[in-house]
Image: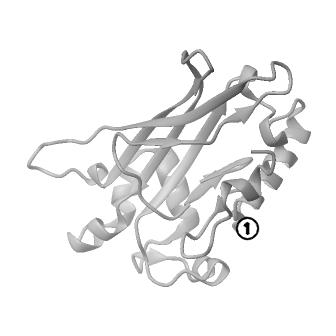
Amino acid sequence: MISRGSAPPALDALESNSDLAMSDLKTEQQETYKTYRVKFRITRSLSSYTESDDYICKIAGEIICSDEAASDSVAGTVEAYVIQVNRIINDGESLFHACDAHSQTVHDYGCVLFDFRSGGLKPAIEDQFGVVGTSDILILDKIEVLPAHRGHGDAFVAGEKRASAKLRAYWSRLGFKQIRGSKKFALSLQHRRPKLKELVPEL
């Protein structure tokens, strides 16, 4: 899994139309409990002919907040991509062409992660993250939390420089590491990840 700049992404795939529920979070101002979950939507082509960019799945997500009155509101959005590396290799297609045909965003991530000539991860990436072999890549390109829902766990704060530092520290607690020579972060799912209680002890 890999992410950019101050808000990183990682190495795995997501299931279409899934809900990821988070435990109740207590706000300091209202002293009420709110539940957050993420709804994902993946658009796929059903054509019998496969274009190069069909190997990249775009994921759109909404962060939904439910309050004690069972009222839902949008708390933020998520934009992500899955590079289906195994399918690309299995079909004998070019990893470079798949990334390049999709978008500049995916191409830029691909240039950081892949050795396009060998068709796999760069040796430096394998070395830094202890990854063996190549699997599908989940890219978390953008996570936006609306102002009314910021501040939980001190992850989102005012001031761009301070906010960036806080975000880097927050993602590091999740296990993300900055890719050497890049502003992007990555996480190997082959290693243990912290439990929610470890990240937010007050839950």
Does residue 47 appear left or right of residue 60 in this picture?
left
Front in this rendered view, residue 162 or 20: 20
**Numbered circles on residues, count:** 1
Classify the position of the C terminus by image quarter: top right
* Percent position of residue 30, x then y: 81, 18
Q: Position of residue 138 (x, y in %)?
A: 48, 57
Residue 11 at x, y = what percent?
51, 65
Relative to 32, is 63 on the left or the right?
Answer: left
Of residues 118 and 149, the one drawn nearer to the viewer in this rendering: 149
How many C-alpha atoms fall within 10 Å of the one at disc 1: few (<14), some, or many (≥20)?
Answer: few
On-image quarter of the N terminus = bottom right
Task: Choose between 48 and 69: the one closer to the eye.
Answer: 69
**Which amino acid type corresponds to the residue marked 1 in the rendered image?**
Gly
Residue at horizontal 59 percent and vertical 54 percent from the top: 9
Q: Residue at x 36, y 67 (%)?
A: 85
Q: Considering depth in this image, is 109 or 161 the residue closer to the camera? A: 161
Q: Secondary structure at mark 1?
A: loop
Q: Residue at x 25, y 42 (%)?
A: 44
| Res 108 → quadrant | bottom right
Residue depicted at x 80% and y 42%: 153
Is 64 located above or below residue 135 in the figure? Answer: above
Decide if residue 136 is on the left or right side of residue 86: right
Rendered position, 108 above or below 188: above
Vertical relation: 15 (above or below) 146: below
- Relative image position of residue 123 (x, y in whole percent): 57, 83
Q: Residue furthest left?
A: 48
**Image quarter for residue 64?**
top right
Find disc 1 in the rendering and name its residue.
181
